[in-house]
Image (cartoon, rainbow, N blue to C red):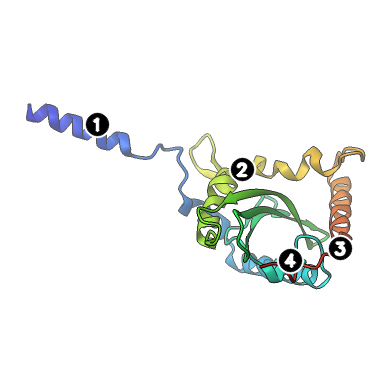
Amino acid sequence: MNQKLLLALLIFICGCKPSPKYITKEEVYKVAFSNPEEVEQIRTAIYDSIAVWKKEKVERYNMAPYVKMKIDTLICFNKKRDKLITCRLSSPKTTTSFDNIVYFYGVKINEKWYFFDGPGLVIGRKDEKIPNTFTQLSSMAYQEVFSGYLKRNKEGKLEINDDFFADLTSGAWYRDTPYPHNKETWDKRYLEIVSENRSKIDTNDYSKMK
């Protein structure tokens, strides 16, 4: 009987071990921060851009005094390191039922980085007066956005999953314009997107928000 119990226990323990294909959060961060100096330079460039957008009252950023905002710690680069995806975490200081996680994209064109927002996720609050913390929002962003960043190749080794960046070449970006078929035309379209976003000035007065 004791041998049977021991065998059952061993089977249970082995069954609880992660699959060899499972990718831990630590492994994702290790790859993402393989060049910490570059990551910090990019983070600085992102916040510099956001500061300009706030000053110019660009949509989504004109409410900055009334919304706590932070770029997620995780910044994911593609293999060529000319595209990136991260998240902008935002939490209104007002009584509301939700916070937000917004996709935040970057493309490198002629050795210069350009940034723009993507779609957003609405994250409910358990209590309208108590916002989700940035730690909570970051954890949700990892589950909902970043979990597909890496994959294992045939040898079982980790590598960047370039399909993770497919959003940056989806139909959402070109709409009625001709579909870009090469890097040159995509770069042109990205610059148009950046210009379009900068032209969206918000003239609303949010000073009466509570």
Q: Is residue 79 left or right of residue 134?
A: right
Judged left or right of residue 203, residue 130 is left
Q: Which residue is mark 4?
A: 63
Q: Percent position (x, y) of residue 155?
A: 50, 37
Residue 14, position as x, y percentages in the image? 28, 35
Real-space CA distance between mark 1 and mark 2, rounded to the nearest whole angstrom: 33 Å
Q: Secondary structure at mark 3?
A: loop
- Closer to the eye: label 3 or 2: 3
Mark 3 or mark 4: name the one nearer the start of the chain.
4
Residue 148 in the image: x percent, y percent?
57, 43
Q: Which mark is residue 11?
A: 1
Camera-side mark, 1 or 4: 4
Rendered residue at 48%/51% (across/down): 25
Q: Are marks 1 and 3 in contact (CB under 8 Å)?
A: no
> What residue would you read off at disc 2?
161
Q: Is residue 183 above or below residue 90?
A: above
On the image, the x and y values in percent for residue 210 come to: 66, 68
Q: Amino acid at mark 4?
A: Met
Q: Which mark is residue 137?
A: none
Q: For the residue marked with disc 3, what is the amino acid?
A: Ile
User: Which callout, 1 or 3, points at the residue further toward the start of the chain?
Assistant: 1
Gap in Å between the C-alphas at discs 1 and 4?
55 Å
Marks 4/2: CA–CA distance: 35 Å
Do we see residue 127 in this rendering? yes
Residue where numbered disc 3 is placed = 201
